[in-house]
Image: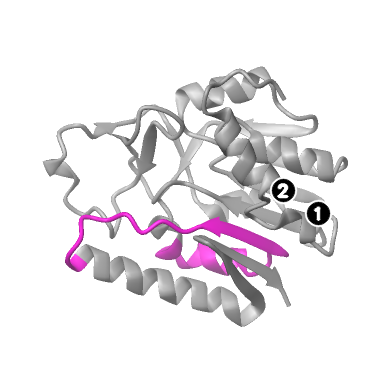
């Protein structure tokens, strides 16, 4: 993978050198890897090196990140430019490098989106649910790995029961859990729905935490 971005080293150090998702400790070889929030493809290249025969599906909404991903994709990899959500998608500026934008649907954490003048509606972006992704790309007898890093959009997953139920069949789940919100009542509701969803997964998976990463291996 080409090192052509100034902030690439930090992403590489977190995902590969530190192995924040504990991928090197897996006790199985996945047939399918779903990389949700693929960014420029660091995680995808990492798992390709570890699992040469796995099918990889990368989902990334950001235009610039997706362009970099298309320039240097891993082999046997399907690229999908889409956001995870429940309908309309809003593009939200965050920081000048790395994750420059977040992509959120109307959600528990930010119910009053109209007050944010910098939010931009993205009608041109495709929208997927985790349920859609799993149903389309993971076969019944296939070993599977699901990684999610969508910068605060997790509540549209946690509040969507079909997505949580589909995730229960995944062999290994790695989610970077963000707790971004407007504060106040939305913050409380976000905490409740996050706890409920992760508790459901813990019924079928052995769960550990690595910093803000929720890691779950199917029992």
Q: CA distance from mark 1 to mark 2?
A: 7 Å
The quadrant the N terminus occupies is top right
Pointers 1 and 2 in contact (C-beta within 8 Å): yes
Task: Give the residue furthest to the right.
Answer: 53
What scheme was used to colour the molecule? one colour
Q: How many marks?
A: 2
Q: Is residue 169 magenta?
A: yes
Residue at which label 2 appears = 33
Percent position (x, y) of residue 149?
52, 48
Residue drawn at 62 percent across, 53 percent down? 20
Span shown in magenta? 158-185
Q: Local crowd at mark 2 within 10 Å, few (<14), some, or many (≥20)?
A: many
Q: Is residue 163 magenta?
A: yes
Neighbourhood count class around disc 1 (C-alpha, 10 Å): few under 14, some 14–19, many 20 upward: many
Residue 203 is drawn in which quadrant?
bottom right
Question: In the shown orientation, is residue 198 left or right of residue 46?
Answer: left
Q: Which residue does the image show at 80% across and 29% down from the upper left?
A: 75
Residue located beneath label 1 in the image: 30
């Amino acid at each position: 993978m080409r090192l052509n971005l100034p902030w690439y080293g930090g992403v590489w150090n977190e995902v590969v050198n530190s192995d924040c998702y504990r991928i090197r400790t897996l006790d199985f070889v996945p047939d399918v890897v779903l990389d949700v929030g693929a960014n420029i493809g660091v995680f995808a290249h990492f798992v390709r090196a570890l699992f040469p025969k796995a099918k990889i599906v990368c989902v990334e909404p950001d235009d610039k990140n997706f362009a970099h991903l298309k320039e240097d994709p891993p082999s046997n990899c399907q690229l999908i430019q889409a956001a995870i959500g429940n309908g309309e998608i809003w593009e939200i500026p965050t920081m000048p490098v790395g994750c420059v934008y977040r992509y959120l649907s109307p959600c528990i954490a930010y119910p009053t989106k109209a007050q944010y003048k910098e939010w931009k509606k993205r009608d041109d972006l495709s929208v997927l649910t985790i349920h859609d992704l799993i149903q389309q790309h993971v076969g019944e007898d296939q070993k599977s790995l699901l990684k999610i890093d969508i910068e605060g959009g997790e509540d549209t997953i946690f509040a969507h029961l079909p997505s949580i139920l589909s995730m229960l069949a995944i062999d290994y789940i790695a989610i970077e859990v963000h707790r971004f919100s407007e504060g106040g009542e939305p913050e409380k509701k976000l905490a409740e729905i996050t706890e409920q969803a992760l508790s459901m997964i813990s019924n079928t998976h052995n769960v550990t935490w690595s910093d803000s990463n929720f890691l779950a291996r199917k029992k």
